[in-house]
Image: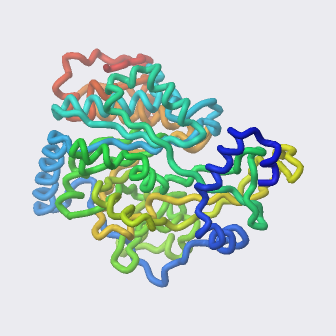
């Protein structure tokens, strides 16, 4: 507290409170293992491809199980046992957008924001199943206040303030390469959000889990704020999770190529585990089955179903901790004289945790495959891969595919892409099946049309 003598009482008190939050028992270990060394996660000696459920049943027995699971999932949703939970701590900086990423306008016709689309999705599912599905939103210190302002200005998107629970994730201190904790200002430690893995602590610490228990919620539908195609409330996924007595389950994609930058679902000592793409040896990444398919074909897409009881179990006793991951970054700070420094090169280490590292802690875990074109179009970058342009086109493509499944003619260009701009509001349809009951409300679609169904 070198500058404490210069600080007025309120700033001195705030700094002391921040210091009191530091985990002094673990910091020396973090410095030795992750700050001064690369400290990668211990790699297993042996791992196998993880088993999964296919998107569609492949046998009569599996078809019967899917039918029962879907019915059970619908019953649990209607009984008020399921909540939505979005991890929304990020800013829109990489998109060239000033504000919380959840406030980024993304829909192809109406330019609805990500938050708006998710809220509509939950409202539509609530209406469909005759229930109220509450929404839990984890922010970060970067955008907590702004997020609350956005929801208040939007009237909580019709969900009702009482059904939206907004809380902050935790933070971890930032270090220079020698292990010193950096200061952001004379009255503030340089910190960064503790990663999406911090959600499992923050849910408990914030009172969100207590609120869920009060409401009778048993299952948490976890997703990240950048993916507008996610199916927030999926009866089949819920049903399979419960039938198989899982504690934390995941959706997966078949990878586009062996080295796609997604985590790899593996089985380690009988437990579902995600091995990062950067950690998976090339030999394993390129390994194929007899039919030519990749052995390690399942990619993690940050869609999970988590039992409330599992989050409680992890947090009981207060000693729960996920593995730490190290990130070398450019960290703004003040120097020893209190002068602000904006580094041009990486100058320190940020620490974070990943939610998928909790999977091996679950007694049982289900993986359900989904289709990329149906459920995964993250908007991360201003241009190129995972850009807003790509995401919007995938939203249009999915809308076109849904309409064609319902028997509607969609004009297409010579290259096969839709020759129109389409947007289907969640309030209009949550699934292709929902469209079939509304054919009389769908106009003829001509080349070049811009159609909004809502």
Q: Percent x, y for residue 227?
A: 45, 41
Q: Percent x, y for residue 188?
A: 71, 46
Report the side of 63 relative to 374 (left or right): left
* Residue at x-position 59% and y-position 31%: 99
* Number of dots carrying numbers: 0
Q: Percent x, y for residue 289?
A: 38, 74
Could you say which quadrant of the image residue 318 lies in? bottom left
* Residue at x-position 87% and y-position 44%: 339
What scheme was used to colour the molecule? rainbow
Could you tell me if residue 301 is visible in this image?
Answer: no
Q: Percent x, y for residue 228?
A: 42, 37
* Residue at x-position 78% and y-position 48%: 4
Q: Nearer the viewer, residue 367 or 342?
A: 342
Q: Is residue 120 above or below residue 133?
A: above
Could you say which quadrant of the image residue 351 lies in? bottom right
Quadrant placement of the N terminus: bottom right
Could you tell me if residue 396 is visible in this image?
Answer: yes
Report the side of 263 relative to 298 (left or right): right
Outermost residue toward the right? 337
Outermost residue toward the bottom? 45
Quadrant placement of the C terminus: top left
* Residue at x-position 66% and y-position 44%: 13
Q: Is residue 209 above or below residue 91?
A: below
Q: Is residue 226 above or below residue 284?
A: above
């Amino acid at each position: 507290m070198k500058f404490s003598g210069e600080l007025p009482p309120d700033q001195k008190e705030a700094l002391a409170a921040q210091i009191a939050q530091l985990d002094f028992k673990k910091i020396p270990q973090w410095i030795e293992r992750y700050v001064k060394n690369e400290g990668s996660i211990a790699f297993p000696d042996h791992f196998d491809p993880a088993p999964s459920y296919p998107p569609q049943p492949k046998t009569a027995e599996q078809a019967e199980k899917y039918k029962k699971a879907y019915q059970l999932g619908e019953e649990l949703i209607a009984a008020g046992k399921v909540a939505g939970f979005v991890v929304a701590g990020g800013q829109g900086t990489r998109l060239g957008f000033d504000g919380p990423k959840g406030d980024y306008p993304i829909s192809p016709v109406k330019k609805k924001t990500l938050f708006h689309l998710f809220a509509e999705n939950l409202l539509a599912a609530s209406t469909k199943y005759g229930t109220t599905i509450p929404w839990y939103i984890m922010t970060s210190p970067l955008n907590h206040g702004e997020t609350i302002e956005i929801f208040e200005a939007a009237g909580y998107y019709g969900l009702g303030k009482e059904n939206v629970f907004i809380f902050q994730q935790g933070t971890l201190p930032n270090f220079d390469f020698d292990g010193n904790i950096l200061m952001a200002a004379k009255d503030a430690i340089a910190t960064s959000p503790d990663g999406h893995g911090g959600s499992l602590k923050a849910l408990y610490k914030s009172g969100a889990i207590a609120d869920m228990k009060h409401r009778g919620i048993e299952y948490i539908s976890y997703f990240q704020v950048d993916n507008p195609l996610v199916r927030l409330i999926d009866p089949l996924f819920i049903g399979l999770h419960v039938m198989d007595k899982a504690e934390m389950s995941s959706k997966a994609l078949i990878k586009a190529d062996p080295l796609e930058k997604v985590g790899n679902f593996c089985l380690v000592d009988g437990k579902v585990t995600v091995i990062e793409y950067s950690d998976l040896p090339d030999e394993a990444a390129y390994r194929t089955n007899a039919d030519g398919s990749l052995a390690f074909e399942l990619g993690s897409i940050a869609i999970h179903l988590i039992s409330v009881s599992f989050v409680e179990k992890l947090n009981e006793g207060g000693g729960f901790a996920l593995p730490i991951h190290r990130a070398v970054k450019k960290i703004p700070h003040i120097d020893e004289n209190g002068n602000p420094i904006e580094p041009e090169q990486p100058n320190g280490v940020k620490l974070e945790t990943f939610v998928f590292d909790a999977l091996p802690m679950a007694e049982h875990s289900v993986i359900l495959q989904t289709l990329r074109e149906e459920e995964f179009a993250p908007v991360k970058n201003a241009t190129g891969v995972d850009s807003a342009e790509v995401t919007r086109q995938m939203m249009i493509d999915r809308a076109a595919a849904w309409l064609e499944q319902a028997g509607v003619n969609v004009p297409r260009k010579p290259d096969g892409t839709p020759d129109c701009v389409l947007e289907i509001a969640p309030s209009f349809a949550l699934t292709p099946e929902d469209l079939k009951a509304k054919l009389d409300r769908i106009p003829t679609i001509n080349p070049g049309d811009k159609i909004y169904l809502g």
